[in-house]
Image (cartoon, rainbow, N blue to C red):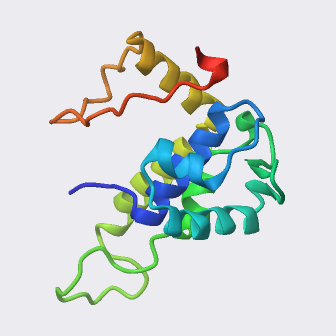
Amino acid sequence: MQASLGRKGDYSVRAVLDIARRNGDRRKAREIATEMDIPNRYLTQILANLVQHGLLEAVAGPTGGYVLARPSDEISLLEVVEAAEGPIALDVCVLRGGPCSWENSCPVHIPWARAQNAMAEQLSTTSFADLVGIDGELSAGTHQIPEDTPPHKSPTPRLPRKLDKRNR
């Protein structure tokens, strides 16, 4: 089993991470799309949703763009994931298709709900400032993966980050 984000969640996290990297500078949608490899047509919907959820602010005009609505240390990974994908909730039995004579929960419900709650807790205590810090360490080759966090079975290709004036 793999716990992963859907496309909306993936693109939402990428977009907020890109904006968080910029320390308050406005980002145009096309800049985010290029940097984070997100289809521009879809990104505008993603950004509008994040604005609607109060995570981003949109500034119109030639010098406009998108900025975080709050400092990056006040925006959690859980907020962005839930804005995109909806609440993390165990509202159907995880044992699909089998005989289930339990009214409100089955034997798997309690451990599954506890695991889900632990994941939500971890996402809620991880801020985008934390993610920007990890991203910087990964780029510098100094990030140490904790022993209780196995790496990907096959490495994910990392695109070279385009350098802006601040990163040169």
- Asked if residue 119 lies left or right of residue 144, the reply is right
Looking at this view, is 115 or 80 the one in front? Answer: 80
Q: Is residue 129 above or below residue 141?
A: below
Above/below status of 27 relative to 49: above
Q: Quadrant of the C terminus?
A: top right
Left/right placement of residue 56 relative to residue 138 reads right
Position of the N terminus by quadrant? bottom left
**Pick the front one: 81 or 90:** 81
Q: Quadrant of residue 143?
A: top left
Place of residue 45 in the rendered image (x, y in percent of width and height, measured from the top left): 59, 70
Q: Residue at x 71, y 37 (%)?
A: 72
Q: Who is closer to the viewer here, 46 or 110? A: 46
Q: Residue at coordinates 78% horizontally, 60% vertically from top-left?
A: 54
Report x, y in % for residue 122.
Answer: 52, 41
Q: Residue at x 32, y 55 (%)?
A: 3
Locate residue 18, reporting x and y percent: 58, 40
Name the outermost residue toward the top.
142
- Which quadrant of the figure has residue 23? top right
Answer left or right for 22 relative to 119: right
Q: Position of residue 166 (x, y in %)?
A: 67, 19
Eyeballing the image, is 117 above or below 46?
above
